[in-house]
Each structure stands twice: as C-alpha cells, then as structure tokens.
Amino acid sequence: MGSLNRIYAMVLRHVYLLRGSWPRILELAYWPVMQMILWGFITQFFMGHSEWVAQAAGLLLAAVLLWDVLFRSQLGVTLPFYEELFSRNLGHLFVSPLRPWELIVSLLGISTLRTLIGVIPAALLAIPLYRYSIFEMGLPLLVFFTQLLVTGWALGLMVSGLVLRFGLGAQSLAWVAIFALAPVSGIYYPIAALPEWLQPIALGLPSAHVFEGMRSVLLGEGFHTGHFLWALLLNLLYIGLGASLFIRVFHLARKRGLLLHSGE
Amino acid sequence: MAIQVSTLTKRFDGALAVDAVSFSIERGSATALLGPNGAGKTTTLAMLLGLMTPTSGSIRVLGTDMLRHRYRVLGRMNYASPYIDLPQRLTVRENLNVYGRLYGVRALPKRIGQLAQELDLGPFMKRAYRELSAGQRTRVALAKALINEPELLLLDEPTASLDPDTGDRIRTWLEAYRARTGATLLLASHNMPEVERLCDRVLMMRSGRIVDDGTPAGLASRYGRSNLEEVFLDVARQPGTQG
C-alpha cells in the first residue's frame, strides 16, 4: 500500500506539471500530428507510384504512428526524469521513503500517459484527413502498442541511468539514442531490405519484430506469432537491462554523492 | 539514541572527506555540526540520510541500521537544505501534497492546512515554487521537512541567505516544533548566533574530523572566548585547515 501511494505521488507530481501548462500538453500531441500529416501526403503520393504501398493504404501511416509510440514512450521516461534533475529535486526524493524501483514504476506510468496524450490525437485525426483508422487493426494494434511502449521504456531507463551518471551534459541522448534504432527497426521498409550483415542486428531489436508483424497484418498475412514472441522475449531482456542499469547507476550515484549535487 | 555513528569514513577518489568520525546524539536534543567549508558537514549529513554511502563505518538512526534498513526509518526523519530544491513549476500546495503522499502522511489536507497556518504559507499556497522569494522558499522547504512530523530533523544551513526577520521566524518555528514534539534536531550551520540559540551541543568539524564537542557556552569558555563565532575562527584557522 505504501509503495502504491508513493508511486501515485510521483505520477501525480507529473500530472500536476502537465495540468499546469496547456502548451506542454499541446506540444506532446503536436509532433505526432505533424508527422502523421506529412506521412499521410507521402502515402497519397506513393499510392499512385508504388505497387508495394498500394497494397495497403495504412502501411506508412501505421508505421509513423507506431514509431511515435516508441519515441514518445522513451521520451516519456527520460523527460520526467530530467525534470527532477532540472528541479534539483533528487535529493529530496531520496531522503523520503521512495525506493528507486518505485521511481522507475512511476516513470513508466507517466510515460504511458504522455504517449497516449501524444499519439491518440494523431491517430484520430488520420481518420477524417486520410480516411485511415489505425484502430481497424484490432487486437494486434494493442499488442504492437504495448511492445513498442516497453521498448521505449527500456531505452528511456538506459538513457536516464546514463544521464544520472554523466550529468545533464548527456541529456541530448534522449533524442539521439532512439534515432540510432530507427534505420534498423524496419519502420517503413521490410528488414529484408537491409544489407544482409545488418539483418541479424535488426532482428535483435523488439521494434524490428513489431514492424514486421505490423506489415504482416496490414498486408493480409495475419498475425505473426513468431515476431510477437521474439518481440516479447527481447523486450523482457531489454527492460530488465534498462531497470538494472538504472538501479546500478543509482547505487553508484549514492556512492559518489551525485544525488546531492544533481542538477543544472 | 537518535543517532549513533561509529568510525564513519567517506573517501572520494582518494581524498578523505570524512575521516573516521564517531558520535552519538540523544533523542530530543538539538546539535550543530560546525566547521569551515569543506570540513565534511554536508557529507556527514548526506550519509546520515542515506543519500550517500560511506566508505566504511556504521550508522544507526532511531535504532535502525541505516546502511542495511534505511527504508524502515526514512519515513520518521526529514531534511531541508538550500542546496536542493523542490519541483519548481508545482504550486506550494501541490508540492506539499506530493511529499505528504511520499511520506504516507495520514489526514494530509489537514496537515497541509496546519503547516500553512503555522508557517504563514497561506498567501502563496497556489503560487508556483519558482515564483517565490528566497525567504518564502525556505518556509516551504521547512514545511516539506515537517510534513511527516519527523522525530529526527536534519537541516543544512536552515537560514542561509535569509534576512534577519525571516531567519528569526524560522528559528522560532524550529524551537516551537522541538518543544511541541520532542524531536531531535541536527543542523549544519555557519550562523553562530543561530547555533547558540537553537542548539544545546556543538560538534566542531575540521578536515573531515570532529575536533571538539561541547555546549556552546562550554566551548567558548574552553577556548577563552566570549562567543561561538570566535571559537569557530580559532578552530578554522588552526594550521592544516583547508578553505
């Protein structure tokens, strides 16, 4: 009960932050909407010029929306954590009974909230703008969403851990790290399109399996259980690694006195 | 005992910040850690709070081994320092609400109301923390530190950079809190009149070690000085002192 109360307190802290600033909420939704609009036009253009895209209108739009799930969920962990650093608040947090794992769980909760606020308006706007509803994907959409959310969490925890260790000078990792995954995640093209030597690396990422699975569903080949299981397994591995790294750096931070001196 | 520390040592990359310090602090007492900059006061407080792990030594707080079971006791203590902040964009009420929940405070709205009244926070409860003056921030930080009615309150320079009026109010609140609850106070301060007023014991630190221990009046008498400030200067200027 105590843990739940503390996790709730930390989620509440970030809900207060969002609630107190409409521009922040608008900003969360702005980029996914802009991406969706851009890729909607690209889709319309390619529908008449690409046989592959013409097979399924939603290939690129679904890809961009799901990519934003991954991107937003990663930022949803790192930015609230940066907020504690900017506020020089870590010292107060960790003289309270808040455990590091409770902070992690609260960051994951906040990330989910921020991702939904960011992506749902874009997905809804795609319906009137391009007559495309990602929700028609049905249950597999929930699977893809969840898997990408977890991948984003894992990366977010790793980045947060590194920033706790190396300070806010490393904060740009929040935007840089995720784009290292983009080329090998097969967001807009099949993994088979990558050079052969790169394909095993790509298939070591849960996101590559999710986007392969998404194309399988959209091209009418059905839900690919193999990709789902690989994504699940890899996500378990990466979220475990992300949480372990964060906790390990937290202990190192206690050893080096970084919790007291964290901040701008 | 509220605090029992034995041969507490902290080393950073070979540099000794706290050097085999041992002391005990009785429940209900008010003790000051005094010493020049770099003496090891903040590092000692951080280890007592569990914010920093010692290189060696042991710490018992309110009867609990802090190195093994700190979560059993963190809810019974609290801390305020001008060197760490509260979330800047949250209002005062939101900050107290968040921290009250983190400390598992029961009847939280009532407790927040009490603190608002006792510390005169009423006029700015709805304002963002970042919009407050230094004095107002210190009062809010103190409210956060008192939210769980701690049995042990650790304060790092509680009235640093405050005008004399606000500083005096803070000291009055601290005295009243201690008188009402019987809480133990441990504070690091550079304000000697504050220490003379609030504390019944002083631990003098220099270069990571405790070099003297006594009541403010007892120390002044031992050094043949008229007040604690002169004692502080004597200790700080002894050969081998850094900073």
Image (tube, grey):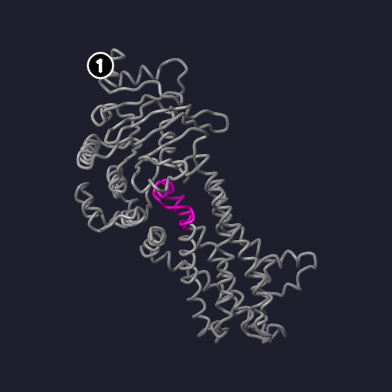
**Magenta segment range?**
A80-103
The N terminus of chain B sits in image quarter: top left
The C terminus of chain B sits in image quarter: top left
Instruction: Give me the chain letter of mark 1.
Output: B
Q: Residue at x 20, y 42 (%)?
A: B180
Q: Residue at x 27, y 19 (%)?
A: B218
Quarter holding residue A19 = bottom left
The chief SS type of the magenta part is helix
| Residue A252 placement, left or right of B63 | right
Question: Magenta span has B23?
Answer: no
| Residue B77 placement, left or right of A110 | left
A127, above or below B237, in the image: below
Question: Magenta span has A88?
Answer: yes
Dot 1 corresponds to which residue? Answer: B226
A130, above or below A262, in the image: below
Quarter holding residue A53 = bottom right
B5, above or below B97, in the image: above
Identify residue type, mark 1.
Answer: Ser
Quarter holding residue B160 = top left
